[in-house]
Image (cartoon, rainbow, N blue to C red):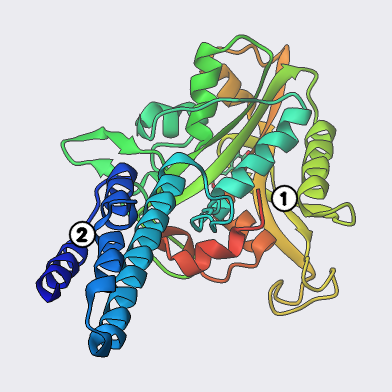
Amino acid sequence: MKQKIQEINQEINSFSPSSVEEIEIFRIKMLGKKGLITSLFSDFRDVLAEEKKEFGQVINTLKNKVVEIIDSSKLNFKDKNIRSNSIDLSLQHEPFFMGSRHPISLIKNELYSIFQKLGFSLSEGPEIEDDWHVFSALNFPKEHPARDMQDTFFIEKNPDILLRTHTSSVQVRSMENDKLPIRIICPGRVFRNEAISARAHCIFHQIEGLYIDKGVSFADLKQTLLFFSRELFGSDTNIRLRPSFFPFTEPSAEMDITCKLCGGKGCSVCKHTGWLEVLGCGMVDPKVLELNNIDNKIYSGYAFGIGLERLAMLKYQVKDLRLYFENDIRFLNNFKNYL
Ligand code: DAH
């Protein structure tokens, strides 16, 4: 009998079912009517009285062991079934990190929607341009300092080809190709040969605006810019236009807005003037219309050029221009709450 117990014990120890059916077969083999453990209980009758206690304990332990193994194996299969057949709704989802829009994109999108309300549509041009579209057609005299090697990146083998220094070049392309009246905004990257610092970079972004129609006046320009400034910076914003000079506009002006930090009282950001410079603008010089085959006796227009980095600096109070180009995630994460 001792040997029989040993053999059963071994079989129990090596039991490793690969299906629920195998567990049932094992249960019948051990605990069924003619099962091995059941038969041990029948054999127990023939055990000598003085050995009964010891054998009784051994057989009971063996039976409990089998019951335990059967139960735990069943549980194991049930668990696997649940995992493969259904969805566990109590599981935590994987963390999903949302990115943020770049501040330059944020400002650009905001300007799109403001000018869209006024009927402007989007127009784009190439970053690699020629002298005509960047300078000549915009009435830059041949000896104008903006053409200087200091400012402009020329293509070495052909000085007629260059990286555009402003998006005003898209004005020229539009006057060439589009039907009048023209009412466009032109966003894009521009390039200037400047040392990189907190306030200057060799690559930056502009949005150019151009409106050409019959009877366009300076009052139209002023009202458009006031509307734009109040939409972007708030309805308490005021603007002022200071006389300036650009070869392609006459008269020309620079526009300031009331300083957002001090409300116009004067602080270190606005250098105690209460005003912040935002853009350049003016009436399209009749000479430019003529150069681009538009009859300047019938048509007039206004134009403006906005630096996006500067605008974003004012709006989001960014102190160093270089932050826009470094892709530092700590900087970009500040814009998570903007859409
Ligand atoms: N193109 C000028 C610049 O890059 C900005 C500018 C000024 C554009 C006046 C205009 C304008 O259209 O009217 O500095």
Q: Is residue 171 left or right of residue 326?
A: right
**Residue 293: percent from the left, percent from the top?**
55, 12
Residue type, label 1: Pro
**Residue 64: percent from the left, percent from the top?**
36, 71
Name the residue at 43% across, 50% down. Answer: 78
Name the residue at 82% across, 53% down. Answer: 239
Binning the other alpha carbons within 10 Å of mark 1 as few (below 14), some (14 to 19) or many (20 upward) gives: few
Whichever of callouts 2 and 1 sits on the residue coming sooner in the sequence is: 2
Residue labelled with disc 1: 243
The disc at residue 37 is none
Q: Residue furthest left?
A: 3
Taking the image as drawn, is residue 129 in sight?
yes
Residue 24 lies, with reference to residue 155, above or below; the image says below
Q: Write down the quadrant of residue 264 in the picture.
A: bottom right
Q: Nearer the viewer, residue 190 or 25?
A: 25
Residue 133 lies, with reference to residue 109, above or below; the image says above
Q: Nearer the viewer, residue 101 or 302?
A: 101
Secondary element at tag 2: loop
Q: Is residue 203 left or right of residue 177?
A: left
Q: Nearer the viewer, residue 285 or 98?
A: 98
Residue labelled with disc 2: 15
Secondary element at tag 1: strand
Name the residue at 50% across, 37% down. Answer: 167
**Residue 284: percent from the left, percent from the top?**
65, 30
Ligand 1 - quadrant of the structure image: top right
Residue 127 lies, with reference to residue 240, above or below; the image says above
Alpha carbon distance from label 2 to label 1: 96 Å
Q: Are marks 2 and 1 in contact (CB under 8 Å)?
A: no
